[in-house]
Image (spheres, rainbow, N blue to C red):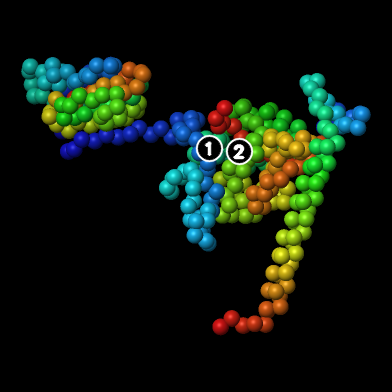
């Protein structure tokens, strides 16, 4: 992998150089906005987890309730 | 004796040409829980009960709804392990299998098109696509994540979950594809 | 048991074609009572009642299709024309 792509950090940006010479710059703002997106996903995952845990605990509590 | 007109069998043509006017494949959901949900309408190709996937008997599978041909079991072509995104692209491009050499890494729409949302672990029909080496490790797509160009879109075998994985750091599986509209 | 009487090949283009009476109904011997038609190349359309088909009207006959005409009446009244941009070809075998 290392021999294919060159990654450097210059002037506050991430600079990626590809084998055919093409260069891509990644700016701080892009990465920060994506970071927020990841954090939102993390919050969502935690929310769904808490709902799944609540369901599991209710199911556990109801073990002794017989269904007619 | 009556007039008789027999159509010739053109299965071979159908596998190599696209005969649809365009449209989405079915999601696979066939149970309806709430009126007008996916299972109620079951929109998408193929219409009616027509066969969706065809096992070509040579380790490849053709999707009649999209015209794509897939490697049914990547472990059979030396792709049974995870690899970096660039290496996965190269592996598909260099693949010579079942008489074809134009294999490539699928884009995210193509990869997602094989998901069957009536199944999980994995979220596809194992009669046509092999069970993955690990249901929790995703498969690479060739599509870059627009807001984060270090990321490529991936699909989790477990439930068809679509997410991004890091191109410079992560290793995932790949399932080569060929064909489709250009 | 029928026997093969004759056969003909017809190129189907932009004019309506019929099967050739001199071939299916020769001056000597019984006329054909059955014909089997193998279609190739460009798609065509046909009618079996003497009506002229057109590019958009008539039963669609495609490359690889096989049509069986079970009587002299079907044979006599078979009309065919090219449906798309390419000529078609019919190989017709008659039995008596």
Circle 1 crowding by C-alpha within 10 Å: few under 14, some 14–19, many from 20: many
Circle 2 crowding by C-alpha within 10 Å: few under 14, some 14–19, many from 20: some
Q: Is residue C87 left or right of residue C72?
A: right
Q: Earlier in the sequence, mark 2 or mark 1?
A: 1
Residue drawn at x 48%, y 43% is B45
Chain for mark 1?
B
Query: In which quadrant is the C terminus of chain B drawn?
Result: top right
**Is residue A24 positioned above or below B29 on the image?**
above
Residue B5 is situated, as x and y percent measured from the top left of the image, at 27, 34
Give the labeled residue for mark 2: B110
Viewer-nearest residue: A53 or B103: A53
**Is residue C18 positioned above or below B159 on the image?**
above
Q: Is residue B50 left or right of residue C16?
A: right
**Is residue B113 positioned above or below C81 on the image?**
below
Q: Is residue A4 visible?
A: no
**Res B82 → quadrant:** top right
Callout 2–callout 1 Cβ contact below 8 Å: yes
Residue B24 is situated, as x and y percent measured from the top left of the image, at 53, 41
Residue drawn at x 64%, y 82% is A65
Quick one: SS at disc 2? helix
Chain for mark 2?
B
**Res B13 → quadrant:** top left
Viewer-nearest residue: B121 or B110: B110
**Res A18 → quadrant:** top right
Residue B66: mark in rendering? 1
């Amino acid at each position: 992998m290392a021999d294919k792509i060159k990654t450097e950090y210059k002037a506050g940006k991430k600079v990626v150089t590809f084998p055919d010479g093409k260069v891509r710059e990644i700016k701080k703002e892009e990465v920060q906005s994506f970071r927020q997106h990841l954090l939102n996903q993390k919050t969502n995952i935690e929310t769904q987890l808490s709902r799944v845990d609540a369901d599991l605990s209710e199911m556990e509590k109801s073990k002794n309730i017989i269904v007619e | 004796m009556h007039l008789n007109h027999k159509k010739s069998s053109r299965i071979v043509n159908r596998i190599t040409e696209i005969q649809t006017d365009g449209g989405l494949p079915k999601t696979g959901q066939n149970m309806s829980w709430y009126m007008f949900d996916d299972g109620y309408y079951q929109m998408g190709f193929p219409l009616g009960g027509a066969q969706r996937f065809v096992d070509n008997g040579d380790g490849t599978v053709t999707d009649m709804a999209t015209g794509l041909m897939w490697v049914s079991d990547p472990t059979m072509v030396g792709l049974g392990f995870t690899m970096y995104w660039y290496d996965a692209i190269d592996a598909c491009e260099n693949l010579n299998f079942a008489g074809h050499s134009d294999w490539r890494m699928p884009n995210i729409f193509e990869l997602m098109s094989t998901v069957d949302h009536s199944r999980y672990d994995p979220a596809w029909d194992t009669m046509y696509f092999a069970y993955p080496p690990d249901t929790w490790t995703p498969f690479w797509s060739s599509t870059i994540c627009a807001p984060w160009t270090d990321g490529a879109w991936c699909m989790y075998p477990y439930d068809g979950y679509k997410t991004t994985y890091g191109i410079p750091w992560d290793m995932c599986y790949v399932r080569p594809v060929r064909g489709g509209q250009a | 048991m029928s026997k093969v009487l004759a056969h003909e090949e017809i190129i189907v283009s932009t004019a309506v074609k019929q099967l050739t009476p001199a071939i299916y109904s020769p001056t000597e011997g019984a006329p054909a009572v059955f014909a089997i038609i193998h279609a190739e190349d460009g798609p065509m359309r046909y009618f079996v009642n003497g009506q002229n088909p057109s590019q958009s009207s008539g039963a669609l006959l495609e490359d690889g299709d096989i049509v069986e005409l079970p009587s002299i009446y079907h044979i006599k009244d078979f009309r065919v024309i090219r449906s798309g941009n390419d000529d078609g070809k019919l190989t017709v075998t008659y039995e008596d």
